[in-house]
Amino acid sequence: MRIGIIQASSQAGKNRLLYDTVKKYAAGSEVINFGCTEEETDRYSYIEISVLAGLLLASRAVDFIVTGCSSGQGMMLACNSFPGVLCGYAPTPADAYLFAQINNGNAISLPLGEEYTWAGYANFDATLARLFSEPFGRGYPREEAARKLRDTELLKQIRRLSQKTPVELMESLDGEFVRSLLRKQDVIRFILDHGRGEIVNWLRSR
């Protein structure tokens, strides 16, 4: 699995923690850090980051995104607005595990600005440990796994049928907003180098 790390600039101070913790628990996966870091001069809202995450997934440059914002809720909602993204919200280890096993999505959003006392860091660490503790999509509880996985596939089918394509969405967005996204060159270069499909062709035409 190739995992992308990218979160809103408002939580740039947590970027290294997010990257290091995913690296620790996502054994055997390639983990790429797309920021946003404190060293970056451009700042990106959770809305902008959600679209960049969607482009990374739509191009298949990455298989999974770990992201977040102050509450985690806004990023989850924004990511789920992009075609083909199924993003969960994981404030606890149980939420992370159930999302991975039942919903089998391709992105997870974490509350990076909440309760960062010692117990908050311990919960954060345990949440990512639980997320990557088993292969995704096995179903839970195990005795109901087949039904759970059928429902998940039906949800994904309904979402595909009800959404625009990624290229159609990008074409309909405000031009200045799109130009701000294209300035995040580490993401764009990675998609062009490692992605495939219509969204890559669209980016090359810009």
Image (cartoon, rainbow, N blue to C red):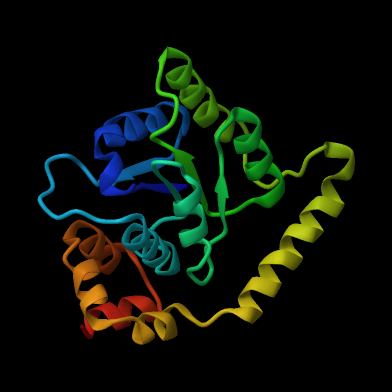
Choose between 85 and 80: the one closer to the eye. Answer: 80
Which of the image's four quarters has the C terminus? Answer: bottom left
- x and y, in percent, of residue 184 in the image: 20, 61
**From the viewer's perspective, is residue 5 above or below residue 123?**
below
Q: Is residue 175 left or right of residue 17?
A: left
Q: Is residue 65 left or right of residue 19?
A: right
**From the viewer's perspective, is residue 12 above or below residue 190?**
above
Badge count: 0
**From the viewer's perspective, is residue 87 above or below residue 168?**
above
Q: Is residue 159 left or right of residue 112?
A: right
Q: Quadrant of residue 97?
A: top right
**From the viewer's perspective, is residue 13 above or below residue 99?**
above
Give the residue at x 57% y 79%: 163
Give the residue at x 73% y 63%: 153
Q: Residue furthest right?
A: 143
- x and y, in percent, of residue 44 in the image: 25, 56
Q: Is residue 15 left or right of residue 108?
A: left
Q: Residue furthest top?
A: 118
Give the residue at x 36% y 55%: 46
Choose between 174 and 187: the one closer to the eye. Answer: 174
- x and y, in percent, of residue 103 in the image: 68, 51
Give the residue at x 50% y 31%: 128
- x and y, in percent, of residue 52 in the image: 33, 62
